[in-house]
Image (tube, grey):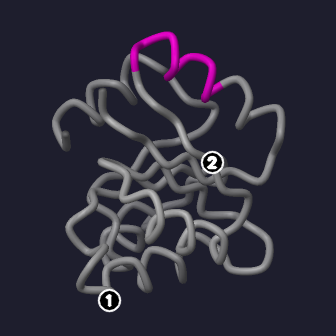
Amino acid sequence: MPKILLVEDNELNRDMLSRRLIRRGFEVVMAGDGAEALDVAARERPDLILLDMSLPTMDGWEAARRLKADAALRGIPVIALTAHAMSGDRERAIEAGCDEFDTKPVEFDRLLTKMDELL
């Protein structure tokens, strides 16, 4: 059972997506901001990280850079999630260290396909 770190500050989004992932057989651990994501990733060693890019305290862009700068965590695939998809955001997410990019609201089947490719 792959372990997914879901980093999302919106409680409703976090609850909905985590329930859907659990129903699909994933183990889900959660963080509400980028700083917490770094701590949870180091402690839990997830198989994949779903990272909202608009977060309080430390945004997803900075969290992705720090995850990929850490030798112990850089091998964990990261999918950037953003509701504010602007031209160039995908490229910016990849430059920050994310392995893939998806938009919100999440189209669950599309997200699962991307997750499967990285797992």
Q: Residue at x 77, y 53 (%)?
A: 9
Q: Is residue 58 above or below residue 60?
A: below
Instruction: Tell me if 59 is positioned left or right of 63 in this view.
Output: right
Q: Residue at x 44, y 71 (%)?
A: 42
Instruction: Tell me if 68 is positioned left or right of 80 in this view.
Output: left
Residue labelled with disc 1: 69
Q: Residue furthest top?
A: 23
| Viewer-nearest residue: 22 or 60 | 22
Callout 2: helix, strand or loop? strand
First to last magenta residue range: 17-25
The circle on residue 30 is: 2
Magenta stretch, overall SS = helix
Q: Where on the picture, by quarter, is residue 67?
A: bottom left
**Callout 1 amino acid:** Ala
Q: Is residue 112 above or below residue 90?
A: above
The quadrant of the image that shows the C terminus is top left
Provide residue 114's location: percent of width, then percent of height.
Answer: 27, 35
